[in-house]
């Protein structure tokens, strides 16, 4: 009491105020596309050009693997490995520094079709010229060399497509598919992949492993928000109130 007979608090501030609270609305804007919308989106990507083949393989990859934006977009040729008749890919995420998953055969076929059509070095196709460190999904032009701070001679062609470019392309195809581009971005494809897994009967543990979540409770909250809370009593309430369908 400092000798004055009065009480004095041990702290003049609340220590808990410096601790960041969890974002309760972390999934508030999360959305997903159902199987019909995903099918329309993929069909809207023309596969008559190298660009179309690349984009089809890129976005089909997000749908079938459920990977985050950079986890799939930064795929390198050396991340792909054959084990018998199966192909596996290595990916790196915030909870998985070095994980390996099977690559669905239709996705492997899409990647091969793109690389077979893309021009490589010395007149060869890219598929013949790929080295382990080469990124798979790369820009097809040199538009970045037009920027004032980029020297054409220093432009490295071996770089992944940027996150912004991937989102812009996805919105373009969404518009062609008759979908609202404002609600669609690359992470929506991850949400969609998770919901497809649940629709097909995958367990919570299986979906958690598929997404690369560290904790099943994260997966549970994730799915609960995406699917929404069902109303199981509305019919009984309507009957009590005398309201017809």
Image (spheres, helix red, strand yellow):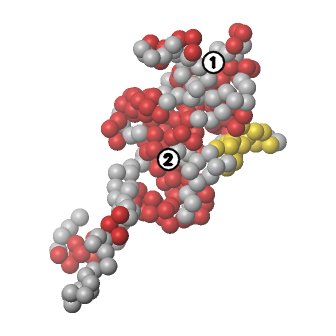
Q: Which residue is at the front of the view, 147 or 177?
A: 147
Residue 180 coordinates in the image, percent (x, y)? 33, 37
Q: Residue at x 49, y 47 (%)?
A: 190
- Relative side of 189 to 20, left or right: right
* Mark 2, residue position: 190
Q: Quadrant of residue 28?
A: bottom left
**Label 2 packing within 10 angstroms: few (<14), some (14-19), many (20+):** many
Residue 70 to residue 19: above or below:
above
Calculate the distance from the C-alpha at mark 1 to the C-alpha at mark 2. 27 Å
Q: Quadrant of residue 197?
A: bottom right
Q: Quadrant of the C terminus?
A: bottom left
Q: Residue furthest bottom?
A: 5
**Label 1 packing within 10 angstroms: few (<14), some (14-19), many (20+):** some
For marks 1 and 2 on the same chain, the one whose residue lies earlier in the sequence: 1
Residue 118 image label: 1
Residue 140 to residue 206: above or below:
above
Residue 234 coordinates in the image, percent (x, y)? 28, 71
Q: Which residue is at the front of the view, 8 or 183?
A: 8
Indicate the secondary structure of the residue bearing disc 1.
Answer: loop
Residue 1 coordinates in the image, percent (x, y)? 26, 86
Q: Residue furthest front?
A: 3
Residue 204 coordinates in the image, percent (x, y)? 56, 64
Q: Residue furthest left?
A: 242
């Amino acid at each position: 009491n400092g000798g004055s007979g009065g009480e004095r608090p041990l702290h003049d501030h609340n220590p808990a105020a410096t601790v960041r609270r969890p974002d309760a609305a972390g999934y508030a804007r999360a959305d997903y596309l159902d199987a019909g919308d995903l099918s329309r989106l993929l069909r809207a990507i023309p596969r008559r050009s190298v660009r179309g083949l690349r984009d089809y393989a890129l976005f089909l990859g997000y749908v079938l693997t459920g990977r985050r934006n950079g986890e799939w977009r930064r795929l390198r040729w050396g991340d792909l490995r054959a084990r018998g008749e199966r192909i596996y890919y290595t990916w790196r995420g915030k909870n998985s520094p070095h994980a390996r998953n099977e690559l669905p055969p239709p996705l492997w076929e899409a990647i091969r079709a793109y690389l077979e059509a893309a021009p490589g070095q010395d007149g060869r196709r890219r598929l013949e010229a790929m080295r382990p460190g080469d990124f798979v999904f790369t820009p097809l032009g040199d538009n970045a060399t037009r920027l004032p701070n980029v020297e054409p001679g220093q432009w490295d062609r071996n770089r992944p497509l940027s996150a912004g470019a991937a989102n812009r392309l996805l919105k373009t195809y969404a518009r062609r598919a008759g979908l609202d581009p404002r609600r669609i971005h690359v992470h929506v494809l991850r949400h969609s992949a998770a919901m497809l897994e649940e629709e097909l009967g995958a367990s919570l543990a299986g979906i958690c492993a598929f997404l690369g979540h560290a904790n099943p409770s994260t997966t549970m909250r994730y799915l609960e928000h995406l699917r929404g809370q069902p109303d199981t009593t509305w019919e009984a309430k309507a009957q009590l109130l005398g309201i017809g369908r």
